[in-house]
């Protein structure tokens, strides 16, 4: 599943990667917000600032990196990733899923 920037429509996260949807949901519920791992970040559109704040390349505040025993954990505000894809991104997603 792809999660899109609520401001620009660019893809920010693709999850689950390397785990099941149930594992993704379980971890997200345990922490109270969607929790993504390094392999699930679309790095061309996401940056982590030195203080751990996670933002889109266009400046949308997404949440924070809160590392745990398993590595980086990007705890993201759901409203920030509830966007619709741009027409270009929507076409790309259709091509990938076919």
Image: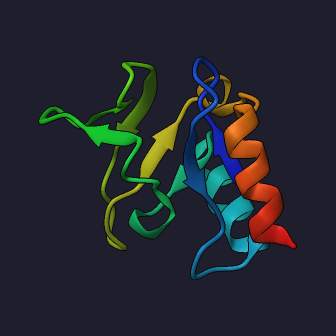
Would residue 33 be found to the left or right of residue 63 on screen?
A: right
Query: Does residue 43 lie above or below 90 as drawn?
Result: below
Q: Residue at x 59, y 74 (%)?
A: 17
Residue 47's x, y, as percent?
29, 40
Query: Does residue 30 lie above or below 3 as drawn?
Result: below
Rendering quarter of residue 57: top left
Residue 5's x, y, as percent?
59, 30
Q: Residue at x 59, y 25 (%)?
A: 80
Q: How is the image coloured?
A: rainbow
Rendering quarter of residue 85: top right
Would residue 54 be found to the left or right of residue 80 on screen?
A: left
| Quadrant in which the N terminus is drawn | bottom right
Residue 71's x, y, as percent?
32, 68
Number of residue marks? 0
Q: Can you see residue 33?
A: yes
Query: In front here: 15 or 93?
Result: 93
Residue 28's x, y, as percent?
64, 52
Query: Does residue 48 lie above or below 19 as drawn?
Result: above
Q: Residue at x 33, y 60 (%)?
A: 72
Q: Can you see residue 1?
A: no
């Amino acid at each position: 599943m792809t999660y899109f920037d609520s401001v620009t429509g660019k893809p920010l996260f693709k999850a689950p990667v390397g785990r099941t949807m149930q594992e993704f949901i379980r971890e997200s519920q345990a922490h109270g917000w969607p929790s993504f791992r390094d392999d699930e970040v679309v790095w061309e559109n996401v940056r982590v600032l030195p203080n751990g704040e996670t933002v889109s390349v266009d400046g949308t505040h997404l949440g924070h990196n809160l590392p745990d025993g398993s590595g980086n954990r990007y705890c993201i505000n759901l409203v920030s990733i509830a966007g619709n894809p741009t027409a270009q991104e929507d076409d790309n997603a259709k091509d990938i899923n076919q």
